[in-house]
Amino acid sequence: METPSAPEPTLVQFARGVIARLTIWSTLRIAVQEGWGGSNGIEKRTFLASEIVDSFEQQTPVPDDIYIEEMLLQVMADEFETIVEDGSAESVAKDIVKLWEETKAGNTALVTKFEDLAEKTKGKKANAQEQVASDDEDDEDDWEDDDGMPEDESDGEEVPQLIDTSRPRREREEPVVDEDGFTLSPTVTDLILDHVCGKDGSKEEFQDLSACSLVCKYLNALVCPRLFERIQVNDEWGFGMATKALRRLTALHELMEASPALATFVRSFTIITHLVGYPDYHGHDWILQNAHIPLILPKLTGLKSFSFQNLTGTVVWKYLSPGMSKAFQDLCLNASITHLDFSNIRGMPVSWIAKCENLSHLRLKYVSEDGGVPDIYQSCDEVTSCPVTSLDILNATSAMQAFSRCTSFSNLKKFKTALHQDGDVTAAQLVLSNAEYSVEELEISSIIRSWGPLAPTLELHTLKSLHTIKINSVLFIIDSHSLPDAISTVLELSSSSPSQSVETIHLCFEWGGTRSVTDGPLALYLHSGWSKLDEIIKDGYPELKKLILEFEDENWNADGDDNKDGDEGEKGDQGDKERAKEHLRNVLPGVASSKSITLQLVITPIMARYEL
């Protein structure tokens, strides 16, 4: 059995950066230092780091900062009995996502920065203030004392503490567990009790504050605000499911009317429907004419992510009630919104999206804009640049045309698109026309036979900051013999205008057949036609550092247990792997012999990675 390969160097760098970033997180340092998670606080911190690294390695798409922030908050509550309300978890989450992006690109400067800062914290007590911000400044002055002296030159002065340790403290109470087995987290009142109830505190003060603490704990358990951080309305499949979803929306609205503070805890609101039949079918009124959603959405002042997805048909916007249409468009007035996701919606006004001042992630799949619906925020005169940094679109040409009339994607860093029809090429051109200095990652999925129109429109050499290109060939619609020409058409640049920024090219091919790797993808897709890719990379991508070829083979067996080919000394797929690697060297001799380029073969679904 083959020995498992070592983790990729970039993953190791990312793990080191995560550990260092958690080490300098003041809130977590205090929790470990004060033993809030018990005597094994350091082990719990390491466990948290491993969970974060695993989530980035295993999940597709990779987690965003909202997901990581919620993971941090949940672990702090569960493992350290601490409710973090100072906003520091958001900063840490953004740093971790940035670590992933930079280490994947081969940049380890941020890892080094955090490790240097972590080294400075050794042997020092944690300060109560979180110091690291999620920006590009490499300023270590933030880690100095108030008098301007570095921590290691402060003449032994102690770091200010959250609690006055010179006063006697009551012993820390064991975690309170309710009758259902839930651990009740410490409240702010616990910290007040620790701070004021020393030898100078009167018995009456202690009793009053203890009573207050008890009330806070049980109210916390009763309300369970974290249950409301992610809300999903899903009609699912089956008879009566829409009725159940409507009842749940009604109950949610009544609960928020009774306890308005609950609305402030909501961070994500998702509507998933399975609307089938005619667009004006009255059975859809439970969602299209819903009376509760227009009343709920304005209350969600802390909402970060909103998603409206129809998975089986198309929602026609004009059939939404005026209240629903206005509630969706009024999301642009919510300054906390950072993520929007819409799919399968016809005739959707989009001008309001350009007015979301802090929007960073936008996903539009099968969304059209026909101008036939009242657009509350149609005037975009004051909007010059959309703040979106990550854009994912498919079949959204008219929506992109509407955007281009009032704004541009000049802040865009990551662009993902699928080419389903000619209009998708037009949409991609509109997006990239004003993003030539910002786009860093480009991912294209092909669902069309001819890639020819791409060459004159995308013009990759004009994207001055582009460092990663990923091309997915979906379902092998392009036949094997024309595939090298198609890929070459996309990547080919004039030798007089090479790309000076691209460092990674990732070509990914799905396979729908049942043949093995020898008579399947690699036999068909690594023939001599690929040799032209060698010249294209040499002339057009002088800064390339990694070329990844990823193939899917349903019968791939990384262990090589079956001797299908009967080769002496080699077993089954193990022999296939060696032949595939040898074939790569033959058809791409320039890349294979280059000392500056790593040629990597990936075979899925088992994801056996082999570096040459």
Image (tube, grey):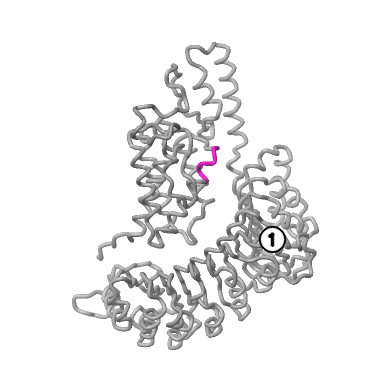
Neighbour tally class for label 1: few under 14, some 14-19, many 20 plus, Cα within 10 Å: some
**What is the x, y in percent for residue 492?**
45, 82
Asked if residue 276 can be seen in this view, the reply is: no
Above or below for 558 versus 62: below
Q: Which residue is at 36% across, 59% downward? A: 10
- Give the image quarter of residue 601: bottom left
Residue type highlighted by circle 1: Val
Relative placement, left or right, of 72 versus 384 is left
Q: In which quarter of the image is the N terminus?
A: bottom left
**What is the x, y in percent for residue 286?**
75, 57
Above or below for 28 versus 590: above
**Residue range highlighted in magenta:** 85-90
Q: Does the magenta stretch include residue 434?
A: no
Q: Which residue is at 45% across, 68% downward? A: 468
**Which residue in the protein does label 1 denote?**
383
- Is 188 in front, or is 469? 469
**What is the x, y in percent for residue 131?**
47, 40
- Give the image quarter of residue 217: top right
- Is 261 in front, or is 148? 148
Q: SS of the residue at dot 1?
A: loop
Q: Is residue 89 magenta?
A: yes
- Is 32 in front, or is 60? 32
Q: Which residue is at 36% across, 57% downward? A: 11
Above or below for 141 versus 343: above
- Give the image quarter of residue 610: bottom left
Q: Quadrant of the C terminus?
A: bottom left
Relative placement, left or right, of 297 versus 189 is right
Asked if residue 49 can be seen in this view, the reply is: yes
Relative placement, left or right, of 365 versus 446 is right
**What is the x, y in percent for residue 120?**
35, 39
Q: Going by the picture, which residue comes out furthest to the front?
A: 148
